[in-house]
Amino acid sequence: MQRWNSLADVPADLGPTVVGIGVFDGVHCGHRAILDRVVEQARERGALSVIVTFDPHPAQVVGRPVPLMLTDVHRRVQLLLAAGIDRVFVLPFGREISEWSPAEFVRRLLVGTLHVEHVVIGANFRFGHKQAGDVDTLAELGREHGFTVEAMALESAPAGTDPGEPDDPGDVVSSTWIRARLAEGDVEAAAEGLARLHSVNGPVVRGDGRGRGLGYPTANVEVHEGLAVPADGVYAGWLVRADGSRLPAAISVGTNPTFDGTERRVEAYALDVDIDLYGEHVTIEFARRLRGMERFDGIDALVAQMREDVEQTRQLLV
């Protein structure tokens, strides 16, 4: 079992571990230094590499605003394991755990359950009731319980990706930073921070059927409301099917203002194919923003623009 979902899932005879701790939303470039170091230290020590992450997001439990997530927990675990981590512990974060003091968090989780030898965290790490503990707290508790602590510096954002300060690399790559890029529709900057294309996923559901009538049948993807979707507009990207096949696609995000729509949707037209995807769980990857969402005066103008969007997508991706 590579994923643990509760304290009871962790084997009682677990050997020594090297542990990284955090939400790790998106498993972005800012996380990779931590993950790489966890794997490196585990190998050097002959220990198991373990990441502790949380579900639901701790903010939800303690009554703070919950950010839009860059990945669902299933995808997060996939990415963590793909980074070379041996085990992922998805700690079910509830009221009881939220009230653990820093000392109790260490005693019950890190020492009593995970038999930790070494912990790797980000420099801004906080833990325990009301986030009372920080890196220094953890290091002090480590000395008491016989494990070491290593804090990794935060990754600087790519220069030129912060609007208003085009040459300032001072911002760090974080889930917040990536969400801000997505809110602007800058999926290319988001991809730099993620080291992959940003994606959303969900089942294909029936929409209004207008696309087929216009000559561009689209897959209407039901995205969980808690996931971060890029700003309204039209994008070039990929529709990834359940079998792993990737189809180049022109993607629309928005409310279909030409038809006075009110529901925000993610719809993808897979270039040059007409397949029945209803009920299939698909992933939509965003490669480049083509334009913002527009309201057209009539069907002819809309179809002409759709034709141009498809041609741009073809030139970029095919």
Image: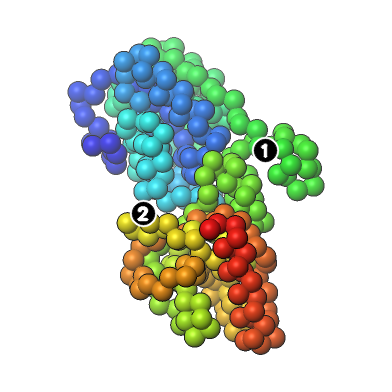
Q: Residue at x 53, y 75 (%)?
A: 263
User: Horizontal and vertical percent for residue 259?
Assistant: 59, 84
Within 10 angstroms of label 1, few (less than 14), some, or many (20 or more) residues? some
Q: SS class of the residue under badge 1?
A: loop
Whether residue 310 is visible, yes or no, is: yes
Colouring rule applied to residues: rainbow
Q: Is residue 233 above or below residue 101?
A: below
Tell me which residue sits at (68%, 79%) in the image.
295
Residue found at x 46% / y 50%: 71
Task: Name the residue type under label 2.
Answer: Gly
Q: Is residue 197 left or right of residue 91?
A: right
- Kindly identify the residue that appears in the image at 51 percent across and 34 percent down: 31
**Which of 191/57 is in front?**
191
Task: Count the labels in the image.
Answer: 2
Q: How far is disc 2 from disc 1 in space, using C-alphas?
A: 30 Å
Quadrant in which the N terminus is drawn:
top left
Q: Is residue 133 left or right of residue 192?
A: left
Seen from the viewer's position, the closer of residues 62 and 259 is 259
Q: Which amino acid does the dot numbered 1 rest on? A: Pro
Question: Where's residue 5, x and y in %?
Answer: 29, 41
Circle nearer the N terminus (2, 1): 1
Residue under label 2, please give it: 244
Left or right: 32, with 80 as reference point: right
Mark on residue 158?
Answer: 1
Q: Position of residue 233 (x, y in %)?
A: 63, 66
At label 2, counting other C-alpha atoms closer than 10 Å, the crowd grade (few under 14, some 14-19, many 20 or more) is few
Residue 234 lies, with reference to residue 101, above or below; the image says below
What number is the disc on residue 52?
Answer: none
Residue 286 sits in quarter: bottom right
The relative height of residue 189 versus residue 15 in the rendered view (above or below) is below
Can you tell which quarter of the image residue 195 is in? Answer: top right
